[in-house]
Amino acid sequence: MRRSADGGPATTPEGRGSAPSPWPDHLYDAYVFDMDGTIYLGDQLLPGARRLVLELRERGIPVRFLSNNPTRDPSQYAEKLRALGIATPISEIANTVVTMTRWLRTHHPGATVFPIAEQPLIDSFREAGIPMSDDPAAIDVVVASYDRSFDYRKLQIAFDALWFHRRAILVATNPDPFCPFPGGRGEPDCAAVVAAIEACTGAKCQMVVGKPNPVMLEEAIGDLRLDPRRCLVVGDRLSTDIRMAARAHMASAMPLTGESTREDVAALDPSDRPTYVLDRVDRLLPAALWRECGWAETD
């Protein structure tokens, strides 16, 4: 049961269509966190993130982590969180490496894939027994992903499989146009690879398994057997994290520590806005519990 700040039953999560609230007045049954821009930025832990996660766990509330970044596997994310003082089991982390591998095994068993991807996704396919090939005549599924070694050779293979042989479909790990870096910089992400393939082949991407697709939430909280309406999605991107929560009819919170701003929120249709907009992520703990914990903003 979801708890209020005083430990009693809480009310149903706020409905969409109104202005975002600045501070929750109750706890949720589980919290699903984006990582980069929400828990940390680059290699820097964001203010209040560690103490919030530890406090939720101390109260017996499940915490899960999600990422659209397919350049790391869950074990690498677990190691990064551990180094930042948030030790986390691999089972509590899901990203598009996990989601794409499971989606292919479920929906295209036995299909031969051509991964335009970095090593973690390729390794995951190999470990799952998914056949891979760079022979366009043998490819059933072209998997586009964040790939910093994307080149003309890979584009040609995808072109031949999709346009010339007309036997493959195009799918993608995530819809992100770029990956943000500290200091306002970034790198082209999966959407740029998909756009290049679509531009030359005329094919359309048939599936994107990453956020905002709610399939990511199934990977994150499916084992908890909780009512999704009693869980909270926390992330800094309106186009992925917050939209995913809306599609799953879940409450959401957007800390102003990543990509999106208050102005971005105000420009949205009210039904698409997050439930909460926070200046720092530990504002997710109700005010009464802040006082109980003796927290200060300078911590």
Image (tube, rainbow, N blue to C red):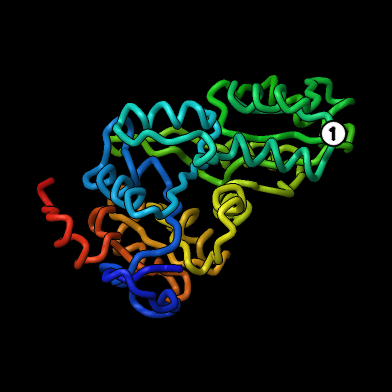
Question: Residue sitting at 31 percent across and 64 percent down?
Answer: 277
Question: Residue sitting at 73 percent across and 28 percent down?
Answer: 128
> What amino acid is at disc 1?
Ala
Q: Assign a secondary structure to mark 1.
A: loop
Does 126 sit above or below residue 285? above
Location of residue 107 by image quarter: top right
Task: Name the side, left or right, on which 244 lies relative to 24.
Answer: right
* Depth order, front residue of 200/27: 27
Q: Position of residue 86 (x, y in %)?
A: 34, 36
Q: Position of residue 29 (x, y in %)?
A: 44, 62
Q: Position of residue 271 (x, y in %)?
A: 47, 75
* Depth order, front residue of 129/37: 129
Within 10 Å of disc 1 (Cα), the crowding (few <14, some 14-19, many 20+) is: some
Question: Residue sitting at 37 percent across and 33 percent down?
Answer: 87
Q: Position of residue 115 (x, y in %)?
A: 70, 28
Residue at numbered disc 1: 111
Location of residue 77 by image quarter: top left
Image quarter where the C terminus lies is top left
Total marks shown come to 1
* Depth order, front residue of 1/156: 1
